[in-house]
Structures are given as C-alpha cells and as structure tokens.
Amino acid sequence: MLKSENEMIEVIQSDKRMMHALRTVRSLNLPDWWIVAGFVRSKIWDVQHGFLESTPLPDVDVIYFDQVNKSETKEKEWERQLAQIDPDVPWSVKNQARMHLKNNLPPYTSSEDAIASFPETATALGVTLNEDRNVVLTAPWGVEDLLQLRVKPTPLYQSDERKSIFF
C-alpha cells in the first residue's frame, strides 16, 4: 500500500508505459503541460488494490496552457502528432486557457489552476517531467483521498449548484 506522494512518484517512475507517455508528451514542448486525472488515479488505485495488470484507460488526458493560441484545431493537431508517435495510446489534448468557458468558470491562470477545478479530489492531479526529466506530481487538494480510495468533490463542486452537475 502506498502511503505518500514520494511513493506514488516512485511507482510512476518505475512504470515503463507511463514514463513512455510522459516522454512522448514532453517531446512536443507544450507550454505548462501535464498528463492528468485517470492516468495517475488508475495507476495508484491499481497498486492500492494489488492489481498486477494496469486498468485500461479510455483516454490519456494531456493538458497544457497556451494563452496565445486557444484554437481547438491546435489541440487536434497536437493529438495527431501524439498519435503519430504512439498510435496505441488514446490521446486527448486540451488547452486549459480556453476550458474555463466550457466549464462556465472564471479564466484559469495556469494548468495547475485548472487541475484544482477538476470535480473530484482523486482525479484533481497530474504529472509532468521537469527539465531533469524527473516526474513532478501536482495535487492541489492533496493525495490523501487518492491513497485512501475515496471519491469526493473538490471544494468548487461542494456547492449544491455545482454538485448537481457531476454528482
């Protein structure tokens, strides 16, 4: 059983599939990029449950933050490039500089700000590679719920208005 953020990072760094995905996304040089949500949650929950096989992912969510080019067309271009590098991964790419509109929220200031607005604490997290190619984890609401296998709303989704949208 994992008990800390450092142990989570070690598990991710030892997973060849995850590291390949991280290196693949890093090769695009996207601004303020992260692989988020189920990519991390599923791996940690697989470990917490003692599963030997990884749970298949419906998609691999890649986010980035680019105030200059907010075009959805550009996101699709990035997805195509990722698919050319690794066609076996179901890539999904979204620029968080425009996603606040879809979520009916004030503009995000960064990818990490957007991650903090995800609906559940167990998926409000992401990983990236720093300049030294080491895994960096962000978890604005901490990792306790993730490690304890709890699904609960982030503070933004605890209001009755937002709760009815997702829960």
Image: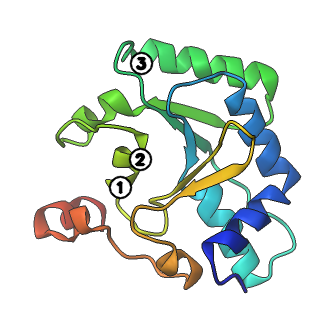
Q: How far is the residue under mark 2 from the one under mark 1?
A: 6 Å
In the rendered image, the quadrant that contains the N terminus is bottom right
Q: Nearer the viewer, mark 2 or mark 3?
A: 2
Tell me what residue is drawn at x 85 percent, y 60 percent: 14
Callouts 2 and 1 close, C-beta under 8 Å: yes
Tell me what residue is drawn at x 18 percent, y 61 percent: 162
Q: Amino acid at mark 3?
A: Glu
Callouts 1 and 3 close, C-beta under 8 Å: no
Badge 2 element: helix
**Label 1 Cα neighbours within 10 Å, binned few <14 / some 14-19 / many ≥20:** many
Q: How far is the residue under mark 2 from the one under mark 3?
A: 20 Å
**Label 3 Cα neighbours within 10 Å, binned few <14 / some 14-19 / many ≥20:** few
Residue highlighted by disc 2:
112
Counting residues from the start of the chain, the first of labels 1 and 3 encountered is 3
Residue highlighted by disc 1:
116
Q: Nearer the viewer, residue 86 or 27?
A: 27
Left or right position of 80 against 120: right
Residue highlighted by disc 3:
72
Q: Nearer the viewer, mark 1 or mark 3?
A: 1
Q: Position of residue 35 (x, y in %)?
A: 59, 44
Counting residues from the start of the chain, the first of labels 2 and 3 encountered is 3
Q: Position of residue 104 (x, y in %)?
A: 18, 41
